[in-house]
């Protein structure tokens, strides 16, 4: 393999794929990045067997070839090189990659590319085309609610369904549920139902930040995998097997009290309350008070024996009766962080039943939070 490539492009490509490198693997090749020529471009690939990312970059190829090199060594080296052309020259006998740039000349010992796990080739004709900006926003509005508890693998994933013109994503950790729907510009050829690891979708959202093109999602039947294809990046992930909870049965169908607040004001009040509440199990009390004349208000309060107490008043339009209810303030803040609309609605029934948070003006987003015990 003899290749010349721009340092900037190579560094960017390595930063994209290195997120899939296995930090602790018994297989040495999984700590490596595959560097291979591929139809006139240079392909970089990394995988930990659950998540795989490939990136193609423009290059001048004098000689075809492939090798895997240690991810950290190669990435750190490329990042220190000047913004000039990098020459890659592989000695196939010793599997050593020579890297030259300006006055720098480095040899890196690699492992034969034959030992690298094969990456799937998607059938894009069977895929569902998604708008990148919309899909990235969907991911951000649900992925934070997925569980990090390894004892419940199904809850570490996001339940994704596609039918006709609609795509839906849902995540829950048992204390909250986040659901986001969107319309598809082109109908899906076949229905999709899959549980995708939250981590894979977080990586996808990160990749999507660099592009505004379309992304194609392919779920090959019976393979237990999902693949997302951009023009020059592909991400493949294993699916999580199991049955996702019937979250729709938990979402309250009606409410006795609807409290509408400015998103920014409620978010600021929660951030202030969290400073005190984090010393006391993150409990925050919301005292929803109907105004006798005109708008009402919500008192957001937190107290901790060690730290003190905090109260913030937020103006609100309240329909229905007043109520005192407690929530985990971190959960409130995290959902308010992903709501884009200027106003937010909190729908409640009683202090021991779930609260529902919605973005005012949108029917596409629903977030359910279980209440905490009022001490």
Image (cartoon, rainbow, N blue to C red):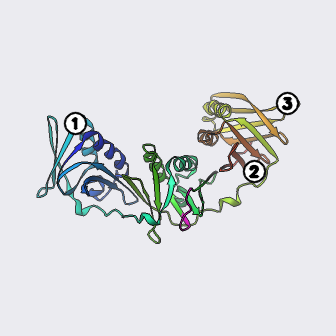
- Give the class, few, some or many, for how many residues have Cα within 10 Å of label 2's Cα (few <14, many ≥20): some
Q: Determine the CA span between mark 1 and mark 3.
A: 66 Å
- Give the class, few, some or many, for how many residues have Cα within 10 Å of label 3's Cα (few <14, many ≥20): few
Tell us which disc is closer to us: 3 or 2.
3
Q: Mark 2 sits on what residue? A: 353
User: What residue appears at the point 57 percent right and 56 percent down from the top-left corner?
Assistant: 184
User: What residue appears at the point 76 percent right and 55 percent down from the top-left corner?
Assistant: 253
The one of 258 and 13 positioned closer to us in this rendering: 13
The image position of residue 145, as x and y in percent, is 58, 49
Say the numbered circle drawn on residue 84: 1
Q: Mark 3 sits on what residue? A: 294
Q: Determine the CA span between mark 2 and mark 1.
A: 61 Å
**In the rendered view of the protein, which quadrant contains the C terminus?**
top right
The one of 366 and 290 positioned closer to us in this rendering: 366
Q: Determine the CA span between mark 3 and mark 2.
A: 28 Å
Q: In the picture shown, does residue 247 fall above or below 262? A: below
Tell us which disc is closer to us: 2 or 1.
1
- Classify mark 2: helix, strand or loop: loop
Question: Which contiguous range is marked in magenta?
Answer: 185-193
């Amino acid at each position: 393999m003899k290749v010349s490539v721009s340092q900037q492009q190579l560094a960017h490509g390595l930063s994209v794929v290195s997120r899939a490198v296995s930090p602790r693997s018994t297989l040495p090749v999984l700590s490596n990045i595959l560097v291979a020529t591929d139809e006139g471009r240079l392909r970089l690939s990394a995988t930990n067997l659950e998540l795989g990312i490939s990136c193609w970059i423009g290059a001048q190829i004098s000689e075809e070839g492939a090798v895997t090199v240690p991810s950290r060594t190669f990435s750190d080296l490329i990042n220190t090189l000047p913004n000039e052309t990098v020459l890659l020259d592989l000695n196939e006998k010793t599997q050593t990659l020579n890297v030259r740039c300006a006055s720098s000349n480095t040899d890196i010992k690699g492992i034969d590319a034959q030992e690298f796990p094969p990456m799937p080739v998607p059938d894009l004709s069977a895929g569902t085309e998604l708008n990148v900006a919309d899909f990235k926003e969907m991911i951000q509005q649900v992925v934070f609610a997925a569980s990090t508890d390894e004892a419940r693998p199904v809850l570490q994933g996001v339940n994704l369904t596609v039918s006709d013109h609609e795509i839906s994503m849902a995540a829950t950790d048992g204390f909250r549920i986040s659901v986001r729907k969107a319309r598809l510009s082109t109908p899906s050829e076949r229905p999709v139902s899959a549980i995708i690891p939250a981590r894979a979708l977080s990586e996808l959202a990160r990749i999507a930040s660099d592009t505004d093109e379309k992304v194609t999602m392919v779920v090959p039947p019976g393979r237990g995998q999902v693949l997302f294809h951009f023009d020059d990046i592909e991400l493949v992930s294993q699916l999580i097997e199991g049955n996702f909870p019937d979250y729709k049965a938990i979402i309250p169908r009606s409410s006795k009290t609807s409290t509408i607040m400015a998103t920014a004001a409620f978010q600021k009040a929660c951030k202030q309350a969290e400073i005190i509440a984090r010393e006391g199990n993150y409990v925050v009390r919301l005292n929803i008070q109907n105004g006798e004349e005109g708008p009402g208000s919500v008192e957001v309060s937190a107290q901790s024996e060690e730290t003190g107490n905090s109260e913030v008043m937020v103006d609100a339009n309240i329909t229905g009766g007043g109520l005192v209810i407690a929530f985990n303030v971190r959960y409130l803040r995290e959902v308010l962080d992903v709501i884009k609309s200027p106003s937010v609605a909190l729908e409640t029934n009683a202090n021991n039943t779930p609260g529902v948070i919605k973005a005012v003006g949108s029917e596409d987003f629903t977030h359910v939070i279980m209440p905490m015990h009022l001490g």
